[in-house]
Image (spheres, grey):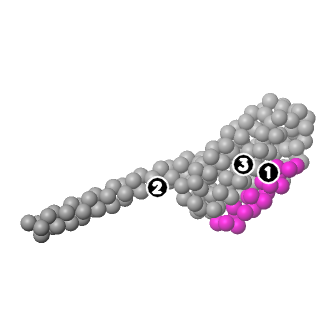
Amino acid sequence: MRRGLITAVITVLVISLTIAVWYINIISNQFNTLLNSMESHARLDLIMLSDNLNELTYLTSINVSHGLIAYKLETAFSHTRVLEFTSWTLYKYSGNKKLYLLHIAFSNLETYIIDVMNDHPNKLINRITKNADILTKISAILKDIHKNGGLRSTPNDIINELVNLTRVITYH
């Protein structure tokens, strides 16, 4: 009787453990799919932000209206916000430090864009013109991040360069 009870308990434990491991694998796969999907959607924002920064520098060089520049700033802000949120979320769930650094870089860029958006039209154009070289470099780095497969697969040196550039631009 006692042996039968022990055998039954062990059988139940083995079956329960097997089901738990199976369930954890399913949840883990779904979680990884979710993170991959977030990063995949962010890749479009990388390209769009890169293009917006290039367009901003071009538009200020040909003296277009403040309204068009303000519109481009708003779209750049939107893409920066998505990238900031995505890099933070990916960092939060993966613990990968380079994602935290990307969050800092996008946060710095977002601060700069908001600050410029709140400037008087003449000052706004001057600030973009003054930072055109840095904006162009940031744009190129964003394209490099895209080419490298996205936020999680970008080499540290590229991320560090982006962080440094966004720190410089924030304070100009």
Segment colored magenta: 155-172
- Does the segment drawn in magenta span residue 168? yes
Q: Amino acid at mark 2?
A: Asn
**Left or right: where 101 falls relative to 11:** right
- Residue contact at pointers 1 and 2, CB within 8 angstroms: no
Residue 164: name its quadrant. Answer: bottom right
Q: Comparing marks 3 and 1, which lies closer to the viewer?
A: 3
Q: Which residue lies under the disc numbered 3? A: 107
* SS state under label 2: helix
- Residue contact at pointers 3 and 1, CB within 8 angstroms: no
* SS state under label 1: helix
Q: Which residue lies under the disc numbered 2? A: 32
Nearer-the-camera pick, 120 or 47: 120
Residue 154: tell me if it is visible: yes
- Does the segment drawn in magenta span residue 141? no
Quarter of the figure with the N terminus: bottom left
For marks 3 and 1, give the CA distance: 15 Å
- Characterize the magenta stretch by its predominant secondary structure: helix
For marks 1 and 2, give the CA distance: 33 Å
Mark 2 Cα shell of 10 Å, populated few (<14), some (14-19), many (≥20): some
